[in-house]
Image (tube, rainbow, N blue to C red):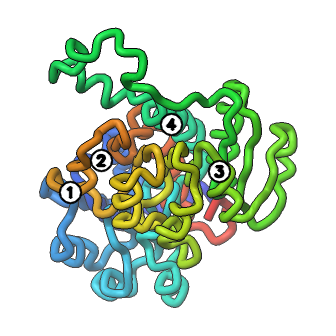
Amino acid sequence: TSIHSLMLKMSSNATVFVTRNDVPTCALDLLREHFQVKVNPNDGIITREELLKGVKGVDGIFCLLSDRIDEDVVKSAGTSLKTVCTMSVGYDHIDLAVMKSHGIKVGYTPDVLTDSVAEHTVGLLLATARNFFSANKEIFNGGWQKNNCCPVWMLGGEIRNSIVGIFGLGRIGLAIMKRLASFDVKEFLYTSRSDKVSAVQYGARRVSIDELASSSDYIIIACALTPETKEVFNKNIFKKMKKSSYLVNISRGGVIQQDDLIEALKNNQIAGAGLDVMTPEPLPSDHPLTKLSNCSKYCISLYTIHYRNSKLCPLSLTLFWNNLFFECFSTKHKHNR
């Protein structure tokens, strides 16, 4: 019997709990080929009570960024729990220390979304700097009729000959840099623990966060959320940024001290902000970010909009399933962790 056949036989009795019932059918079909699958029957984000109840006695958990997986979840699942896999690049919603202490392996989906996120970031940067969202609103509220042919209306920033700073130059940061290079950027700056050889071809220079803030015309946050990066973009950094600069965040909302950002936008400390992530998520419709008087200062996009690609669903879910399958039943298979 081959190792693969043996694992297939072993997996037939394993149970996987899926935290959402709106997971694409292709994912559930893959799981059901090899596992007993339990799916949260209720719509939307799973409640804490539903999560603790649903994981009891399972071997694996199929979760998303909205699901906090911690000690309570592990205790509720019991000793049968072998792996937790998240359909995401980030895994800050999973308590890794707890998983390690219980010998539970964690799977995630790196690389699958790199190109899509990079494309989305460029779009968000352009939309923010060139006032796409605000200009669209003016078509419907009468602003276009009132300001037609006004030479100073809806002025925005230009990427050509600008200085672009990328905070956190990993896979996604490099993919963003590659795409922006075609805009004839004057200089790329970046932060990282070490110099990136792959950034040399773009003439990029590694700098401190202070220099990144004071020198950049556009700052793109592409780092992971860690204790070191939590709220690192705060009033002290905003004070150092150019008044003409724009901030784009495609990382995690927690990297920005959001109240400080709101004040910076209100007080014209920076020109604008494009946010793909924020705190909390979903953002309440009456949140201060949605009430800024000058809407051309900012734009907010729907988080994980980079998933909206039908080609990415099978890729992401296949990698996800492979992680889950091999983590549960193979001690020799190597994969991204």
Toward the viewer: 96 or 172? 172
Q: Which residue is mark 1?
A: 287
Q: Amino acid at mark 2?
A: Val
Q: Which residue is mark 2?
A: 23
Q: Earlier in the sequence, mark 4 or mark 2?
A: 2
Verify CB contact (< 8 Å) between mark 2 and mark 3. no
Q: Residue at x 70, y 30 (%)?
A: 161
Q: In 3D space, how far apart are the residues under numbered discs 3 and 4 (Cα atoms)?
A: 12 Å
Residue 125 tag number: 4
Toward the viewer: 8 or 290? 290
Q: In 3D space, how far apart are the residues under numbered discs 4 and 2 (Cα atoms)?
A: 29 Å
Q: Residue at x 16, y 51 (%)?
A: 285
Residue 70 in the image: state x and y as whole percent.
Answer: 38, 81
**Neighbour class for label 1 at 10 Å: few (<14), some, many (≥20)?**
few
Q: Earlier in the sequence, mark 2 or mark 1?
A: 2
Q: Amino acid at mark 4?
A: Leu
**Neighbour class for label 2 at 10 Å: few (<14), some, many (≥20)?**
some
**Neighbour class for label 3 at 10 Å: few (<14), some, many (≥20)?**
many
Q: In 3D space, how far apart are the residues under numbered discs 3 and 1 (Cα atoms)?
A: 27 Å
For residue 86, above or below residue 75: above
Q: For mark 3, give the secondary structure.
A: strand
Q: Which residue is mark 3?
A: 166
For residue 174, above or below residue 235: above
